[in-house]
Amino acid sequence: MSSKPDLRVLVGRQEIEKTIGRLADNINEDYRGKNPLIIGILIGSFVFLADLIRLLEFPLDLDFVRLSSYGAGTETSGKVRMALEPGAQIKGRDVLVVEDIIDTGYSLAFLIDYLKKKEPASLKLCVLADKPSRRQVPVEIDYNGFTVPDEFLVGYGLDYNEKYRNLPDICILGEGE
């Protein structure tokens, strides 16, 4: 039996809700009159994506990809693989990728490169949390929720070994886990 985890709230649920509203306002302005394909990156983005799309005021199509670069720890392996490819047609579409957090940039750079080869009409990126201090590969973020410190974060879809995704706040996971 493990002891109680050391969790400290970094971003509370009210601030998350307000930030998602701001992101949705910006996305609504940019995609008004369009029918974009929104691609969520599983598993982490599903909580953020669900809340975000309920605030979007235009028709949209939804698809998912699943990428993996983490093992059973807190450090990326640097090698990205696509476990689930998008099933939707990308060529000629306005595509918006939605991700929970960008850290080193390896996964998102891999996905952006993959999608560009499919010839979308446009390609933009929306992330809930950006951790620029860890960036190894440059990635352009079009819609950024928060800039976060170099801490291991859990909650609101973010996990550690598949735990803590269900927390309503974004928390810093301390050394106790």
Image (tube, rainbow, N blue to C red):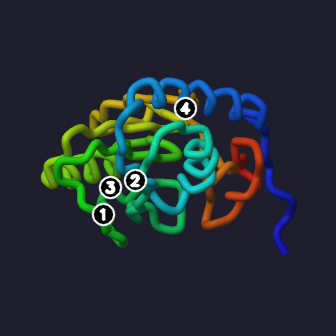
Identify the mark at residue 129; answer none if there is no mark: none
Residue underneath mark 3: 78
Q: Amino acid at mark 4?
A: Ala
Looking at the figure, which quarter contains the N terminus? bottom right
Q: CA distance from mark 1 to mark 3?
A: 27 Å
Label located before the other in sequence (4 or 2): 4
Q: Which image quarter: residue 139?
A: top left
The circle drawn on residue 24 is 4
| Earlier residue among tags 1 and 2 | 2
Earlier in the chain: of badge 4 and badge 1, it is: 4
Q: How many neighbours does mark 3 have within 10 angstroms: few (below 14), some (14-19), or many (20 or more)?
A: some
Residue at the bottom extreme of this rendering: 1
What kind of residue is marked 3? Gly
Instruction: From the image, tell me which residue sits under label 1.
Output: 88
Where is residue 120? Give x, y as percent.
Answer: 20, 46
Q: Earlier in the sequence, mark 3 or mark 2?
A: 2
- To which residue does mark 2 refer? 39
